[in-house]
Image (cartoon, helix red, strand yellow):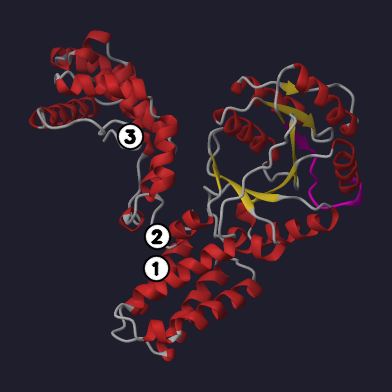
Amino acid sequence: MFEDLTQKLESALKNLKGQGKLTEKNISDGLKEIRRALLEADVNYKVVKQFIEDVRQKAVGETVLRSVTPGQQIVKIVHDELIRLMGESRMDIKMAGIPPTIVMLVGLQGSGKTTFAGKLANFLRKKGRHPMLVAADVYRPAAKEQLRVIGKQLGIPVYITEHNDAVKICQEAIPAARQQGCDVLILDTAGRLHIDDAMMQELKAIQNTVKPHEILFVADGMTGQDAVTAASEFQVWLDYDGVVLTKMDGDSRGGAALSIRAVTGKPIKFIGTGETLDAVEPFYPDRMASRILGMGDIVSLVEKAQETLDVEKAKKLEQKLRRNEFTLEDFYDQLQQLKKMGPLEQLLGMIPGMGKQLRNVQVDEKALVRIEAIINSMTPEERRNPRIINGSRRKRIARGSGTRVQDVNQLLNQFEQMRKMIKRMKGKKFRGMFSPGSFPF
């Protein structure tokens, strides 16, 4: 996420931090590099101009120029201005006093509304809510079917009817939600390839009829200034409450995230970070500013761990570690929990300083798949006691997993090294090593 922008900003700030003494001249030179980095990231040029001016005014002040660590002061100013640019604080969805809370999703076709509808439903369910999805896109072929499949996959009810009156569908979904005990209604409305009167009139009719408590504009984060332009045009027709940026795990240059709040005045509320239905994050401007400047995001990392790691399993594993009974079954179980947290490269990038170390390193996600296949090809007895795996068993496991005998040997050797390390640590405190908020490896 924002890899290119992060690298260029780090370079510009490194040059400033390397100065023994800051002057208006070298600050100006550093800000030129920052301006170039932001423009290349497709940030709105008016936003860039104001951002650079705000940083300049604070950077040339007496406090910074006479500071013992002027370079660090500059980093803090840029960090603070990025936070201000993106909204300063987290903005939650407004919940209705009397359920159901109605959340209306709008945006252009292809922005990822339907997938986000499922992600939002899944996110809210983890928070103790009982959502229902509403298939209100009556134009796009297979839109209803896509939402039905998402609902089935998540085990979340979906309101679907055969008629093609979007306003009536949304209206009828409200009593249906109450009947099923659902307290959040998520309306997946139709989009177009471009903004037109017919689409906006329909969205206005839905708004006037069902009076949603929250309207979210869903934009493709990879489109940069196109997303900002669409958000501005939508705002003319529909006074929405917040923005969702999808596909932020791709080759996103950062333009939309850094521009959209300043241009529209609307907060970013969520970002999509992957293709799976749990790959969504609430948007925190301060955490995003830290990521952009290569400082990591340890708070989000801990939250991901707390959401996915099983506390009871962690306690049982702690007991097994104390008894030196760690097996390949336990190792496999830890792999599964790690996978639930998201792509490994993304997770490592949240560790402060790690993003810089990984810049030219390709994280091999397929290695985890190979390890899973090898362990799945073992018998329960072999997983519990790897020492019985002789040459013939290794050949059988390699054939069954579609790997080489060398791969099986490598895994067994690495596992044995891990067991020896655990044995050496025996007697020390294991508590916290495998608890939510920490890593198994």
Neighbor class of circle 2 (other Cα within 10 Å; few <14, some 14-19, many 20+) is many
Residue picked out by circle 2: 294
Amino acid of disc 1: Glu
SS at mark 1 in the image: helix
Between disc 3 and disc 2, the foreground one is: 2
* C-alpha span from label 2 to label 1: 7 Å
Q: Residue at x 14, y 29 (%)?
A: 422
Do labels 3 and 2 touch, CB within 8 Å?
no
Residue 197 vertical position relative to residue 179 in the rendered view, above or below: below
75 lies above or below 216: below
Task: Tell me the residue at 87%/48% (across/down).
Answer: 200
Task: Decide if residue 326 is in sight here.
Answer: no
Q: Amino acid under label 2?
A: Gly
Residue 227 in picture, x, y percent from top left: 69, 57
The local secondary structure at tag 3 comes to helix
Gap between marks 3 and 2 measured at Cα: 26 Å
Instruction: Please give the name of the residue rendered at 25% of the width and 14% of the height, measured from the top-left corner.
Output: 396
Residue extent of the magenta highlight: 185-198
Query: Would you say 104 lies left or right of 118 here?
Result: right
Left or right: residue 172 compared with residue 95: right
In front here: 439 or 61? 61
Q: Is residue 423 above or below residue 194?
A: above
- The percent coordinates of residue 145 (x first, y second) are 73, 25
Numbered mark located on residue 367 in the image:
3
Q: In the picture provided, is 133 more to the left or to the right than 205? A: left
Task: Tell me residue 211's x, y (percent).
Answer: 84, 39
Residue 235 in the figure: left or right of residue 381: right
The amino acid beneath tag 3 is Ala
Foreground tag (3 vs 1): 1
The residue identified by callout 1 is 10
